[in-house]
Image: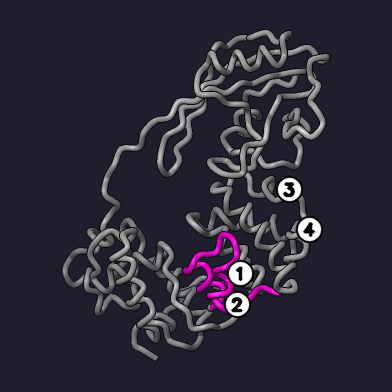
Amino acid sequence: MNTFASRLLAWFDVHGRHDLPWQHPRSAYRVWVSEIMLQQTRAETVIPYFLAFMARFPDVRALADAPADEVLHLWSGLGYYARARNLHRAARLVMEVHGGELPAYRHVLEALPGIGRSTAAAIAAQAFGQAEAILDGNVRRVLARHAGIEGWPGSPAVQRRLWSVAEERIPGLRMADYTQAMMDLGATVCTRRRPDCHRCPVAADCVALAGDRVADLPAPRPGRALPVRTRWAGVVSAPEGIYLERRLASGIWGGLYSLPEREEAGELRDWILSRWPGARQTEPPVERIGHVFSHYRLDLRILRFALPSAACGIMEGEQAIWYNSRLPMRVGLPAPIERFLIEHGNSE
């Protein structure tokens, strides 16, 4: 075993995280779900979602058989909802193509929706002991510092170098522990801000530490200001609830139920009044929801309308519901919209 791996595993045995819920038991299904949830999300945020998800969908069959709305409902607030849709699609493929058993090999796992190279490797290593390197955000940071790799890790050239270093260091045994140890080191010691280098088991030959460049590596993404996108949404209230419609599967908040949106206030108002001629615009005139996505800031401006009960009909098969926040349905809602409905919604 190489010295990097041996030092890391010795540290992990004493200081690593051994009580994460997906480790007990560490089945392929539980590892898979946890790895999807952990994409771009911290473990402490994931844990309550994971426990609720496992309580409702304890195995791949339960997940595959579940309605998509219920899967999205349990994912609400976790963000990056394409992960939930892909997880659900993948579960059905596992049942249909793989007889209900998650594949053990990285190249087969990568063919499933939502599973890229690093996620596939993490599942193969942790669930099946395969000798595979991973490269999530924590591992990229550890390797960029320890090997002194310059440049932004998101660029193809830097990624190739990082993959090469990651593959050179895998031990070939205790792969589940080694994979978890790499993630734990980045999450608890080699952190993005104020890393605790005195506690690091591989600090003795860390290139960044030797050159006093820990704060410089990995290099940040080239700076760019996030653009602001303004949209208009309608809170259409009737005695039965607030009108929500399902968003398209692709794009932001895909597949979730949300307020009807348009680019312009006049366009939104015209659509609502043409659909419900009896609608009456109410005060306050404009409310706002702000939310930051990875590539833009959303400025969602709200107009309110009230309807009589008789105006609430929805044609059969339409992807829309009347939502009462006091009697919430088990459907997926974007977290900012759900908070707004709870705090400011009106079902009267």
Q: Which mark is residue 198?
A: none
Position of 183 with respect to 130 (left or right) is left
Q: Is residue 311 above or below residue 38?
A: above
Q: Which residue is mark 2?
A: 127
Residue 70: image x %, image y %?
73, 48
Q: Which mark is residue 65?
A: 4
Does the CB distance between marks 2 and 4 fall below 8 Å?
Answer: no
Q: Which residue is mark 3?
A: 70
Which of marks 2 and 1 precedes in the sequence?
1
Does the CB distance between marks 3 and 2 fall below 8 Å?
Answer: no
Residue 241: image x %, image y %?
75, 24
Which of marks 2 and 3 precedes in the sequence?
3
- Label 4 SS: helix
- In this rendering, which labeled residue sits more in front, label 1 or label 4? 4
Which of marks 3 and 1 precedes in the sequence?
1
Type of amino acid under label 2: Ala
Does the CB distance between marks 1 and 4 fall below 8 Å?
Answer: no
In which quadrant is the N terminus drawn?
bottom left
